[in-house]
Amino acid sequence: MQDTSHSQARASRAGWLTVDQCKVSDLAALCQTVTAIEELPNASAIIKGVPLYDCAALRAAQEATADASAWRAQLMAEWAGVWTTGPGILIMKGLYADLNVVDETTEQFHRLIEETHKAGIGGDHFAKPGSNDRVWNALEKLCLRAPDVFASYYGNSLMAMVCEAWLGPAYQMTSTVNCVNPGGAAQVAHRDYHMGFLSQAQAQRYPAHVHTVSPMLTLQGAVAHVDMPLESGPTLYLPHSHKYLPGYLVSGMADFQSFFDSNHIQLALNKGDAIFFNPALMHAAGHNRSKDIRRMANLLQISSAFGRAMESIDRVRMAQALYPTLAALTQARTMAPDDLDAALAACAEGYSFPTNLDRDPPLNGLAPQSQQGLLRAALAEGQPAEQFSRRIEEREQTRRS
């Protein structure tokens, strides 16, 4: 499981990544890496280059070991290696030993989907509206409507070990239900949150080292809530693609999409299985070619505790206070545009997340408008301060759970 890319060091020395550094041949060299089961003593098998961990065997081994703490640390280190220098993805076979727990949760998810339909809520990051049913913030919704089901479902120590193996303690769990209906088309290949939600132009503004930091902030997971044969279109993955440094720049590039189409793998899952992968791994939901399988998965996005500022700041109130000054400076042209933008950036929130994706969906892109985007638009339009103040307060209400 060695990194064979020659472009990584060149790109990182340059300090910034650009589109002209993106070469399919470099990605292809990485994807030729072979995953050897001898390097993964706790894995039960290698399926299409992806290590499979039998959760029943892991539970038995944990009960049998004389030093549970050492066993746990060794297993978690092995998983971290899979996500770092290995293929970037692993299968947890039988993560849920009691499928009744999964079924009870599925029932709650179906009810949430029905409520979503009635409310007319839509919007998705990488799929056309209507091809799938999505429930945003399913974690909170499940907890509030069925706390007993929530406790049984998330009270899974192996799942917690997986999360801690990548992120350490104090991680934050979030969940989105995705049900791809028969006929639902495949997604385009992409990476995930954080930088996977940036446009190519936005991603190029971040230094190369930040491209290496982003995958360390989240872990992606998916729990199968139904059996997922290949005809139902389970997710397509490109093992080892997470190691391709300029990978956040290639979404939408035809030659990279073509390489993904020709070289991806697809893994059939059974109800209660789960997959966890590095968020920089290129992947895409598959085409559901079945006649009657509603392919439901609980998509888990687990975040590091460290992605937050130390102090609590009311940036809405700050923006309301600063807006008249910025408006006057804009009108008088007495401050250089770059300096004015720097003052704006110190005041308003430049990131679209976290938000309430039911009320604030990414209908016109990958991310909703940020506070900074709203503030810039108001300045460009010459909005009165009172109008801007109302709009940013309304915007903040929209973002809340």
Image (cartoon, helix red, strand yellow):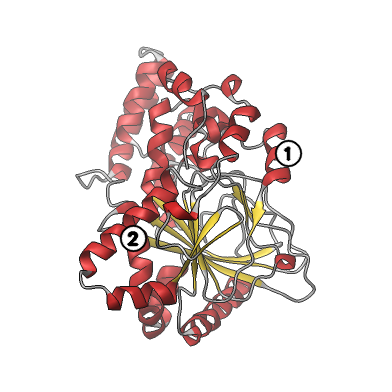
Q: Earlier in the sequence, mark 1 or mark 2?
A: 2
CA gap between label 1 and label 2 equals: 36 Å
> In the image, is 163 to the left or to the right of 37?
left
Q: Nearer the viewer, residue 132 or 228?
A: 228
> In the image, is 54 to the left or to the right of 68?
right
Asked if the residues shown at circle 1 and circle 2 are in contact, with their CB atoms under 8 angstroms apart, the answer is: no
> In the image, is 106 to the left or to the right of 345?
right
Question: Is disc 1 surrounded by few (<14), some (14 to 19) or many (20+) residues within 10 Å?
Answer: few
Q: Tell me if residue 69 comes above or below residue 108 in the rendering.
A: above
**In the image, what residue type sits under mark 1?**
Ser
Residue at image location 33% in from the left, 39% down from the top: 320
Outermost residue, front side: 38
Where residue 174 appears, as percent x and y from the top left, is: 41, 62
Residue 375 is tagged as none
Q: Secondary structure at mark 2?
A: helix
Q: Secondary structure at mark 1?
A: helix
**In the image, what residue type sits under mark 2?**
Leu
Q: Quadrant of residue 294?
A: bottom right
Residue at image location 80% in from the left, 73% down from the top: 291
Residue at numbered disc 1: 258
Residue at image location 54% in from the left, 55% down from the top: 50
Q: Tell me if residue 314 comes above or below residue 357 in the rendering.
A: above
Q: Nearer the viewer, residue 220 or 362?
A: 220
Residue at numbered disc 2: 75
Counting the numbered discs, the total is 2
